[in-house]
Image: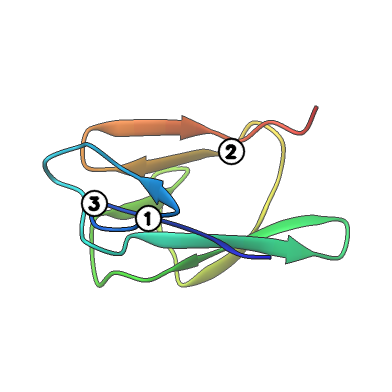
Amino acid sequence: GPRVFGAHTLDIELLDPEAPALAFEIHPAPGGAQIKNLSDKNVLLNNQMIKTESLTDGDIIAVGSSLIKVSYA
């Protein structure tokens, strides 16, 4: 199912002081996963603002000063 990331979530808590309460969610999609921005700001995928995008190996999700590298192992 989807995983929700943010400063005030019980799923995956982001400790970055700039992280919004609900930052983004990642959910399964055909061939991988998809990210959905839940915030009006502060979430970038490969330095670009997004609404919903497919994730590929090596993508970088930025929230505040935190960077999260996508890896399919």
x, y percentage for residue 62?
36, 41
Dot 2: element: loop
Query: Which of label 1 and label 2 is nearer to you?
Result: 1
The disc labelled 3 sits on which kind of residue?
A: Ala
The disc labelled 2 sits on which kind of residue?
A: Asp
Q: Earlier in the sequence, mark 1 or mark 2?
A: 1
Query: Which of label 3 and label 2 is nearer to you?
Result: 3
Task: Say which residue appears at 37% left-offset and 71% top-offset.
Answer: 38
Task: Say which residue appears at 21% left-offset and 49% top-offset.
Answer: 19
Which numbered tag is attached to residue 7? 3
Dot 1: element: loop
Dot 3: element: loop
What crowding class fits label 2: few (fewer than 14 Cα within 10 Å), some (14-19), or many (20 or more)?
some
Task: Say which residue appears at 39% left-offset and 44% top-offset.
Answer: 47
For this orientation, the residue located farthest to the left is 17
x, y percentage for residue 71?
68, 31
The disc labelled 1 sits on which kind of residue?
A: Leu
Task: Say which residue appears at 68% left-offset and 65% top-offset.
Answer: 1
Which numbered tag is attached to residue 10? 1
Query: Which of label 3 and label 1 is nearer to you?
Result: 1
User: Real-space Cα distance between discs 3 and 1?
Assistant: 9 Å
| Colour scheme of the picture | rainbow
36 vs 11: above or below: below
Which numbered tag is attached to residue 59? 2
What crowding class fits label 1: few (fewer than 14 Cα within 10 Å), some (14-19), or many (20 or more)?
few
x, y percentage for residue 59?
59, 38
Left or right placement of residue 57 versus residue 50 in this view: right
